Image (tube, rainbow, N blue to C red):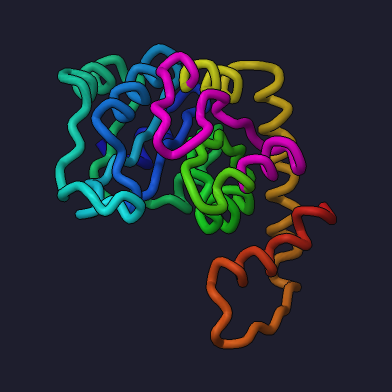
Amino acid sequence: MEVTSKLVSAPSPMIYVSFDTTTALSDEKIREITFGLECSGQKFIWVLREAEKRDIFSGRGEARKIELPQGFEEMAEARDSGVVVRDSAPQLEIFGHPATGGFLSRCEWNSFCMEGISMGVPILARRMHSDQPSNAILISQVIKIGLRVKDCISQDKVMKSSAIQGAVEALMASEQGDEIRKRAAELGVAIRGQWTRAEFAWPSWTPSSIISLGNFSPFLFCC
């Protein structure tokens, strides 16, 4: 089923789930995320691409097709509770659709900041490494357009399904989540309204992530 048609037919907000491919998720981690999504009762779109050949942090692992618990994809399809996409997905189109009510993310700066926030989508932060823990604090405690998965404290720790379930329910099915969604939408409108007026000059050697942060941060704290 096409991702866009799934969004169009959604009677309630769906959560978009996507992590990177630079840190391979173990079978145990995948299993806990699966059960957490299922038990939350919330509709989802999960982009689950093949892990890269090696985990860039451990240097271990081989390319593999990620296996979900047996029957999960078929059950989700039969119940119309979600869809698993095993290839790239039109992320900006998903972010821009009114049925998208949240983004379960690793909090990497580009997808977390430049796309998700600018399109007004609240973030559910499953931080893993590098700058992601500080990004998670920024969205949940500073600009308050998202929540953190409480059980996640390091890239090696396995998030329990109960932590995923509770975080998804809090964002997607609570008054707190509604307020966060409203705030995220308002910030997205403000950012898009001013984006074309932003003119910044950076040296050619400046890393793209630094440019993204520098160009974007004035809007976060003035809107």
Q: Can residue 96 be seen in this view?
A: no
Residue at the spot x=58%, y=38% of the render?
123
Q: Is residue 116 visible?
A: yes
Instruction: State which region is magenta.
Output: 135-163
**Is residue 197 rendered magenta in the image?**
no
Where is residue 220 shown, x and y percent of the image? 75, 54
Where is residue 107 shown, x and y percent of the image? 53, 46
Q: In this view, does 197 lie to the left or right of 62?
A: right
Where is residue 92 shown, x and y percent of the image? 47, 53
Residue at the spot x=71%, y=51% of the render?
189
**Is residue 141 rendered magenta in the image?**
yes
Residue extending furthest toward the right? 222
Residue 152 vertical position relative to residue 36 in the rendered view, above or below: below
The quadrant in which residue 170 appears is top right
Where is residue 97 shown, x and y percent of the image? 51, 42
Residue 36 vertical position relative to residue 212 in the rendered view, above or below: above
**16 and 18: which one is in front?**
18
Residue 114 vertical position relative to residue 179 in the rendered view, above or below: below
**192 and 16: which one is in front?**
16
Q: Is residue 65 left or right of residue 139?
A: left
The quadrant in which residue 37 appears is top left
Residue at the spot x=55%, y=32% of the render?
101
